[in-house]
Amino acid sequence: MKKITIEELKNIKMEYKDKINITDNPFGIEIEFASAPFNIVRDNLEKVLGYDPVVVSWNNKTKKIEDRTKKWVLKNDSTVQDILNDLYRTKVGGEVNTPIMKNNKKYWQELNLICDTLSKTKDIEINGNCSVHIHTSKTIYKVIQEYKNLFKLIMLYEDIAYKIGYGETNTVRPLLTRYAKPLSFHIYKHLDELERMETEKDIIRFIRFDRKHSFNFRNIENIGKATIENRIGNPTLNKIIIQNYVLFNNNFLNYAKIENFDTEFIDYKIKQFEPIFLAESLHDKPDKAIELLDLITKNELDQLYILKQYLKAFNEHDIEKTFHLWYYH
C-alpha cells in the first residue's frame, strides 16, 4: 500500500456495499443492544422482516437449528439484559443474530434494514456492555496447519485486530478483558505446544477450553454451530462499521490458508517477536497495520477502508455521532 496521510484518508468516503471482497465462506453476525424493551424490538423486527424472528430465551431453547440458521434471531443475553422494576417485569436489552449469511445483496440489504430499524427503536442504547461478534464457518479451513497459521497471525498482529475492532473510536469497552481477552501472550508462551497440535481437540486444549478470547475456537467441534468467532468488535449499529468488521475478519482468517500463508515471512517475524499487551492496541502503529493489510488483501480500496477504521480517520459521511453509543454520552 502506498503512503497516505490522515487527511487523504478522511477524504475517502466509505460506502455500504451489496457485495464485498471476501471468500464465499458462510458467516454470521451478533449485535447486542441495551435499554430497549425486548418485546418492542421483536415487534419492530417482525414489521420489517415480514415474519416473527426466532426468539431464543433461557426457558426456550428448543427451536430447531435450521430455524435459527435461516431466519433472524432475537436472543436473551445476560451481559446486556435487565428487568425493569415494574409490575410486568419487562425485559430490556438482548442480542440480534443474523441468519447464516452469504456475501450477496439479499443479506447485506437485510443487515442494512435491521441496523436502521434498531437505530430508530425507542430507548435503545449500545452501551459498554454490548459488542458485535462475527462468526465464520470453520469450513474456511481444511487442515489443522491452517489453524496453527491463524494462531501465529493472531500472536503477531492481535494489537492491530483489536484497534480495527474498536470501530468508531479508540475505546476499550468495560467488559472486553472479561469477554474478549487477548490470546497473543498465551500463544507466545506455548509455541511448542502449538506446533504439536494434530486435531481439533488439540486446538480446544490449547486455548484451555476458554471461549472468552479475542478469537473463540470452542465452537469448532459444535455440530450445529461450527464456527471461529471474532469477539473483539465494539458495539455499533453503523452498518458500514459492521461490514468492515466482516471484511477484515474474513481476509484475516483467509490469509492463514496454506495457499495464501507466507510461512517464511511469518516465521521471520516470530523470531523478532516481543510480547504484545492490550494497552498497545490503543496506539497508532500505521506501518505495522499497513504490513498486515498488504499480507491479507491486495485490493487497495479494501486496504484503505480498513486503514481508515484502524486510524479512526472518519469523515461525517462515514460516521454520525449518535446518542446510541455509550462513548458519546
Image (cartoon, grey):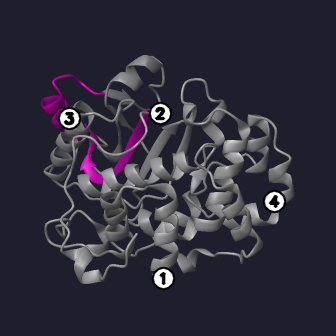
Q: Position of residue 12 (x, y in %)?
A: 20, 69
Q: Earlier in the sequence, mark 4 or mark 3?
A: 3
Q: Amino acid at mark 2?
A: Trp
Q: Earlier in the sequence, mark 2 or mark 4?
A: 2
Label 1 secondary element:
loop
Q: Position of residue 18 (x, y in %)?
A: 22, 41
Residue at image mark 3 = 45
Distance from Cα at disc 2 to Cα at disc 3: 20 Å
Q: Visible in this render: residue 113?
A: yes
Q: What is the magenta range? A: 25-53
21 up-or-down from 303: above or below: above
Q: Nearer the viewer, residue 37 or 42?
A: 42
**Can you tell which quarter of the image residue 236 is in?**
bottom left
Q: Choose mark 2 or mark 4, whichever is in front.
A: 4
Residue at image mark 4 = 191
Q: Earlier in the sequence, mark 2 or mark 3?
A: 3
Distance from Cα at disc 1 to Cα at disc 4: 26 Å
Is 171 inside the magenta-drawn segment? no
Q: Quadrant of the C terminus?
A: bottom left
Residue at image mark 1 = 283
